Image (cartoon, grey):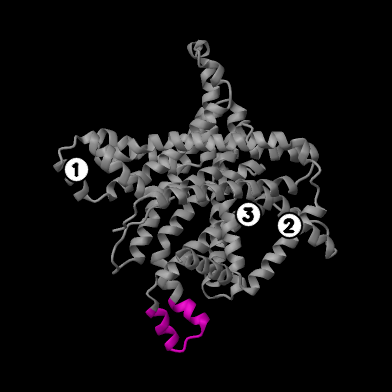
C-alpha cells in the first residue's frame, strides 16, 4: 500500500516537472548536443583517453587529499578561535584573514616559485631526504590547496563551534566528561552537523580551485585539455568536454554530501 | 609596474562587479516574475556557471567570445576587431559574477516583507516604478552581505586572468619576479597589496551595511 502511494507521488512529481515548455527546452538541448556530436571534431579523443583518465584521477586525488587534510587543520583553527587562549586565537584569526584575503593563484605561485627559488640556496635542504619531493610540483599544489581549504573552513568551523547550544556542553560537563571527551563526543559532532551544508558548498568551490595547479605543471584534467588544445589546435571541443567533466564531478559531490546529510539525526532547533 | 597591475585589477573587478550586478538584477527579476521559459533558462545559466570552474569558463568565453564577435563582424561586412584584454576580462568575469549575484539578489528580494510590495501595487504603481521606488531600495540591506562577498571574490578572481596572459596584478608580479629573480619578495608584496584591498573593502562595506540597516533588527552574515 505504501509503495503504491510512493509510486503515485513520484509519478505526479515527474509529471509536474515535465511541463510542455520543458519538453521543448529538453528537445532543443538534445538537438544542440547531437549537433555538437556530429559537426564538431571528436577524433582526437582515442589518442588522449588514457591521459584524460589519469588527469581525472589526479584531480579527484588532489581534491580528496586537500579536503581531508584541510579539514583536519580547520578543526583546531576554528576551536582555538572560539575557546583558545589569546596567543593561539590571534594567530589563527590572522591566518584565516590572510588566506581569505589573497587569491589562491597568488598563494600557489608564492609557494611554488617563491619557496622553489628559496630552497636551493640552503645546502642542508638539498641534502635532506625530502629534496627529491621538493623538486616536484605536487607537494606545493597539495600544500597550497590544503592551506586554502583550512583557511576558509577554519572560519566556517569557528561559526559552527560557537553555534552549538551552551546547554549541550553544560550537560556533558555535568556528566563528568573530561574536556577532551566533550569535544570528541558532543562538541565536534554537533559542530560538524551544523557546518555540513556549508562544507558541501566549500568542497565544490575547492573542486573548482583545483585546475589552478595546472599552472605549476601538475598534470590534472585541466592541463590535459590544454595539451590537446596546443597539440591539435582544436579549441572548443576539449574545453566543452572539460566543462562536462567538472559538472559531473560536481553532481557526484553534491549527491554524496546529500547522502551524508540524510544520515544525520536531524532535529533543527 | 605592480601599481599599474593593481589599477588594471581594480578596473576589471569594478567593471565586472557592476555589469554582473545589472545582470543579477535582471536575472533575479526574471527568476521571480518571469514566465516559465525565462525561469528555466535562468536556472540553467546560474547552475552551469556555478558548477564549472571559473578558469574553464574564462578560457571558454575568452576564446569563444572573441571568435564569435569577429565572425559576427565578418558577416556584417566589417573588418575583424581586436578585442582588448581589458574588455574581454570584464565581460567574462561579469558573466560569472552575474550568475552569483542573480542568486544573492533573488534571496534579497524574497527577504523583503511582501506587504511592502503589495502596498506599492495597491497604490497603482507600474512595475517599473515599483521596482525603482520600493523593491530595489528595500532589498539593499538584505543584499549587502552577499554582494560584499561577491566583491571580494571579484577582486580575487581577477588573478585568474593572469592565465590568459592579461597583465593584471598577479601576472605583473610574475613578470617582475621573473625579471629580477626575487620571486619570494615580489609575491609577498603582491599578497600584501591584495590583503590591503580586501581589508579596506571590508571596512567600507561594513560601514555601508550599518548605514543601510539603520533602524532594523541586527543579524550576522558570513560566508565565502
Helix, strand or loop at mark 3: helix
Give the x, y percent position of residue A19. 61, 73
- Residue A172 got which mark? 1
Q: Is residue B129 left or right of residue B42?
A: left
- Determine if the magenta segment contains residue B117: yes
Helix, strand or loop at mark 1: helix
Q: Is residue A27 left or right of residue A80?
A: right
Residue B134 in sight = yes
- Residue A33 got which mark? 2
Residue reaching furthest right?
A: B77
Q: Residues within 10 Å of mark 1 (few under 14, many from 20)?
A: some
Give the x, y percent position of residue A4. 50, 67
Mark closest to the chain's N terminus, 2 or 1: 2
- Residue at (35, 38) in percent of width and height: A75
Q: Nearer the viewer, mark 1 or mark 3?
A: 1
Give the x, y percent position of residue A164. 27, 49
Q: How many marks?
A: 3
Subunit of mark 3?
A: B
- Residue B92 got which mark? 3
> Closest to the observer: B93 or A20?
A20
- Residue at (60, 50) in percent of width and height: A247
What range of the chain is rendered magenta?
B115-134
- Determine if the magenta segment contains residue A47: no
Give the x, y percent position of residue A150. 42, 38
Structural distance between the alpha carbons of marks 3 and 2: 23 Å
Structural distance between the alpha carbons of marks 2 and 1: 57 Å
Q: Quadrant of the N terminus of chain B?
A: top right
Q: Residues within 10 Å of mark 2 (few under 14, many from 20)?
A: few
Residue B183 in sight = no
Amino acid at each position: 500500500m505504501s509503495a503504491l502511494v510512493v509510486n503515485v507521488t513520484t509519478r505526479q512529481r515527474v509529471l509536474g516537472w515535465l511541463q510542455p515548455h520543458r519538453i521543448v527546452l529538453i528537445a532543443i538541448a538534445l538537438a544542440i548536443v547531437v549537433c555538437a556530436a556530429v559537426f564538431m571534431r571528436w577524433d582526437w579523443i582515442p589518442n588522449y583517453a588514457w591521459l584524460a583518465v589519469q588527469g581525472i584521477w589526479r584531480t579527484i586525488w588532489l581534491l580528496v587529499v586537500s579536503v581531508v587534510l584541510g579539514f583536519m587543520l580547520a578543526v583546531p583553527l576554528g576551536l582555538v578561535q572560539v575557546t583558545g587562549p589569546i596567543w593561539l586565537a590571534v594567530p589563527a584569526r590572522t591566518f584565516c584573514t590572510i588566506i581569505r584575503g589573497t587569491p589562491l593563484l597568488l598563494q600557489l605561485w608564492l609557494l611554488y616559485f617563491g619557496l622553489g627559488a628559496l630552497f636551493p640556496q640552503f645546502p642542508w635542504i638539498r641534502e635532506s631526504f625530502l629534496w627529491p619531493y621538493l623538486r616536484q610540483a605536487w607537494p606545493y599544489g597539495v600544500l597550497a590547496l590544503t592551506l586554502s581549504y583550512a583557511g576558509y573552513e577554519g572560519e566556517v568551523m569557528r561559526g559552527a563551534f560557537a553555534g552549538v547550544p551552551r546547554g549541550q556542553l553544560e550537560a556533558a560537563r555535568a556528566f563528568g566528561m573530561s574536556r577532551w571527551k566533550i569535544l570528541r563526543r558532543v562538541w565536534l559532532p554537533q559542530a560538524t552537523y551544523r557546518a555540513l551544508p556549508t562544507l558541501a558548498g566549500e568542497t565544490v568551490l575547492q573542486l573548482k580551485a583545483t585546475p589552478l595547479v595546472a599552472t605549476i605543471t601538475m598534470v590534472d584534467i585541466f592541463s590535459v585539455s590544454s595539451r590537446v588544445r596546443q597539440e591539435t589546435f582544436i579549441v572548443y571541443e576539449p574545453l566543452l568536454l572539460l566543462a562536462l567533466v567538472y559538472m559531473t564531478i560536481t553532481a557526484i559531490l553534491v549527491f554524496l554530501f546529500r547522502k551524508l546529510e540524510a544520515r544525520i539525526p536531524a532535529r533543527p532547533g | 609596474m605592480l601599481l599599474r597591475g593593481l589599477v588594471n585589477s581594480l578596473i576589471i573587478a569594478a567593471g565586472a562587479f557592476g555589469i554582473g550586478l545589472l545582470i543579477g538584477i535582471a536575472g533575479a527579476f526574471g527568476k521571480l516574475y518571469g514566465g516559465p521559459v525565462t525561469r528555466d533558462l535562468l536556472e540553467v545559466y546560474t547552475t552551469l556557471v556555478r558548477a564549472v570552474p571559473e578558469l574553464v569558463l574564462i578560457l571558454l568565453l575568452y576564446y569563444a567570445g572573441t571568435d564569435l564577435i569577429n565572425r559576427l563582424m565578418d558577416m556584417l561586412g566589417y573588418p575583424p576587431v581586436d578585442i582588448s584584454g581589458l574588455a574581454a576580462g570584464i565581460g567574462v568575469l561579469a558573466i560569472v559574477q552575474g550568475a552569483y549575484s542573480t542568486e544573492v539578489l533573488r534571496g534579497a528580494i524574497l527577504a523583503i516583507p511582501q506587504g511592502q510590495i503589495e502596498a506599492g501595487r495597491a497604490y497603482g504603481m507600474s512595475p517599473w516604478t515599483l521596482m525603482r521606488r520600493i523593491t530595489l531600495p528595500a532589498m539593499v540591506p538584505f543584499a549587502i552581505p552577499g554582494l560584499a562577498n561577491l566583491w571580494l571574490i571579484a577582486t580575487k578572481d581577477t588573478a585568474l586572468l593572469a592565465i590568459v596572459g592579461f597583465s593584471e596584478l598577479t601576472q605583473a608580479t610574475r613578470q617582475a619576479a621573473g625579471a629580477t629573480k626575487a620571486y619570494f619578495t615580489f609575491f609577498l608584496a603582491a599578497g600584501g597589496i591584495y590583503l590591503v584591498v580586501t581589508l579596506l573593502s571590508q571596512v567600507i562595506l561594513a560601514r555601508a551595511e550599518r548605514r543601510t540597516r539603520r533602524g532594523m533588527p541586527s543579524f550576522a552574515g558570513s560566508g565565502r
